[in-house]
Amino acid sequence: MLETLMSKLEVNWNEMVEIRQYLHQNPELSFKEYETAQYIANYYKEIGVEVKHGVGGNGLVATVKGSKPGYTVALRADFDALPIQDEKDVPYKSKVPGVMHACGHDGHTATLLVLAKALKEMEHEIEGTYVFIHQHAEEYAPGGAKPMIEAGCLDGVDVIFGTHLWAQEPLGKIQYRTGPLMAAADRFEIVIKGKGGHGAQPHLTKDSIVVASQLVTNLQQITSRRINPITPAVVTVGSFVADNAFNVIADSAKLIGTVRTFSEDVRDFIIEEMEKVIKGTCLSAGCDYKYTYHKGYPAVINHEEETQFLIHCAKEINEVTEIEESELQMGGEDFSYYLQKVKGTFFFTGAAPDGVTHPYPHHHPKFDINEKAMLIAAKTLGTASLRYQQKYSEERTLQK
């Protein structure tokens, strides 16, 4: 049965490529993926698969049921794009100005659609139920995972698997990690409220730019001096805005940034310490402030048994040439919400383009993937799905 699935995926790899390139040319931003959602729904309807549209927003959930009893296995792919201008010189370049698939979500969607098609063709042979979660808005918090879960996408699900096509790693590599894999991704905004005035009379002002500049430096002391150095944590100021005329001292300055952590205790500690640093810095300069902290996605924490299971499944894939433990990744992923509800694991599938020594990173205007990685991802997810159903049969046998 597994050989049949692998064969079907190989035969339909060209279809994966066609779907991926179509989506790449027609990207849509988070929470605005209306046409993409309709495309996914139409695909399932054409192959005779039950699909629910509008799950938690623009999300979709498709279901394939085997002819024999078994577990309910969920697989997830995201399908939103980013506000980035596509600068690649390829036939499938984005047709939408300022919007592109710069993270591989088009490939995730194509992978899952064709895998669902293959399993649908095998429905009279296979065991259990397969739930295909097509999630909107992964890129922009609060994200699409949480509302989809609240709308019932995980109801009755026993286990969930997901992968991210990872362009920084070579084709043929699978990366896994038990426990924490990707960080909690938060956002903060700080407005320094000073007293503006003439650039030639600084003594009559409270310079918000000077105070904000000091604050950028002072915030770094949280991770360098207040947190155990072996504990991963990042505080980054990504935006500093105090737009003004050249000869005017700014009345206010705004800082926007992100915090990345793996531990909830460390996360809460940083929130409190930031408040202290901001308050102290402003107090010494006689300035006021407004501090807003937005908790984003929690950390992705993989379940041990399911991760080890995934490793064994990956070893069965001929195209997988290397399996290694991933380093901790400070990037965020709202797959974390699924793992808080059901057991499962999230892994990386190497997708570096052929002949490229230094691939463009994710979220870069020239980002691209090796489309052969979609076949590896589909085979790995498909193998995990079918092999997991065998666990059901084995457990039923032991109970008799």
Image (spheres, rainbow, N blue to C red):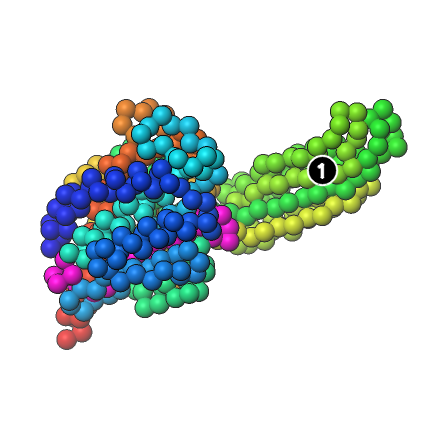
The residue labelled by disc 1 is 253
In this view, the residue in front, 170 or 15, is 15
Q: Residue 136: within the magenta?
A: yes
- Indicate the secondary structure of the residue bearing disc 1: strand
Asked whether, in this view, residue 297 is left or right of residue 125, the answer is right
In this rendering, does residue 154 appear at all?
A: yes
User: Of the residues shown, which amino acid type is indicated by label 1?
Assistant: Ala
The residue depicted at 16 percent of the width and 43 percent of the height is 10
Q: Quadrant of the N terminus?
A: bottom left
The residue depicted at 28 percent of the width and 45 percent of the height is 110
Asked whether, in this view, residue 213 is left or right of residue 15, the answer is right
User: What stretch of residues is rendered in magenta?
Assistant: 122-143
The residue depicted at 45 percent of the width and 40 percent of the height is 82
Disc 1 packing (10 Å; few <14; some 14–19; many ≥20): many
Give the quarter of the image for residue 27: top left
The residue depicted at 82 percent of the width and 41 percent of the height is 286
In this view, the residue in front, 79 or 353, is 79
Asked whether, in this view, residue 219 is left or right of residue 176, the answer is right
**What x and y, as percent, mark residue 335?**
40, 53
Position of residue 270 relative to residue 199, above or below, is below
In this view, the residue in front, 353 or 38, is 38
Give the quarter of the image for residue 174: top left
**What x and y, as percent, mark residue 70?**
20, 67
Q: Residue 67: within the magenta?
A: no
**What x and y, as percent, mark residue 48?**
21, 59
Position of residue 157 relative to residue 267, above or below, is below
Q: Quadrant of the C terminus?
A: bottom left
